[in-house]
Amino acid sequence: MSRDEQLKQRWEQVVIKLSNQFADGDTLDLDAIIYLIGVQELGQLDRKFKKDHKLDLMHIAICRLLEPYGYYEFDFFDDEGWPHYTTKEQLPPLKAGEQSVLMKEAIVSYFMETKYID
C-alpha cells in the first residue's frame, strides 16, 4: 500500500472515530479536529471557550502537531495552564493542498502516538 493510500485510510479512521465521539456522526472537518486537539492539549475539557480562545486553542494544536517536525518547541505553561511554544523554524511556503496534507499527516501521527488509532 502506498504512503498516500495509508495516510488516506488512517485519516478516514480519525475523522469517523472523532465524528462519532464528538459530533453525533456529523463529519468533522480539519479545523474542528485541530480545535479538539487544542482542547485536549490544554486539558480543560469541561470549560466553555470564547471565540478568541478558540483561535488560541487551534494555535496550541498546530504548535503541538508540528513540534515533531521541528517547527515548534514547547516552552512553558503560563499561570492559567496554557502551553506556550517557540518557533524553531519557519514553515516553508506551502500551497493550500500541501498544508492540508501536512496537517493530516501530523494529526494521524498524533492520534497514533496517543493510541487513539492503530
Image (cartoon, rainbow, N blue to C red):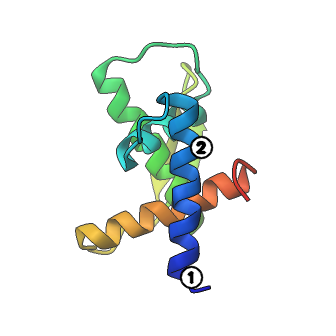
Q: Residues within 10 Å of mark 1 (few under 14, many from 20)?
A: few
Q: Residue at x 44, y 13 (%)?
A: 48
Compared with 79, 118 (above or below) is below
Residue 94 x/y as whole percent: 28, 73
Give the quarter of the figure containing the C terminus: bottom right
| Residue 17 numbered mark, or none | 2
Residue 18 x/y as whole percent: 55, 40
Residue 21 x/y as whole percent: 58, 32
Q: Quick one: SS at disc 2? A: helix
Report the side of 21 relative to 25 (left or right).
right
| Residue type marked 2 | Lys
Can residue 71 be seen by looking at this rendering? no
Q: Quick one: SS at disc 1? A: helix
| Residue type marked 1 | Arg
Compared with 110, 91 (above or below) is below
Residue 8 x/y as whole percent: 50, 69
Q: Residues within 10 Å of mark 2 (few under 14, many from 20)?
A: some
Residue at the bottom extreme? Answer: 2
Q: Residue at x 39, y 49 (%)?
A: 30
Could you tell me if the residues under marks 2 and 1 are in contact, i.e. CB atoms within 8 Å?
A: no
Q: Nearer the viewer, residue 18 or 25?
A: 25
Q: Residue at x 37, y 46 (%)?
A: 29
| Residue 59 numbered mark, or none | none
Q: Residue at x 51, y 49 (%)?
A: 15
Give the quarter of the figure containing the N terminus: bottom right
Quadrant housing residue 69: bottom right
Task: Say which residue label 1 marks.
Answer: 3
Q: Earlier in the sequence, mark 2 or mark 1?
A: 1
Q: Nearer the viewer, residue 75 or 28?
A: 28
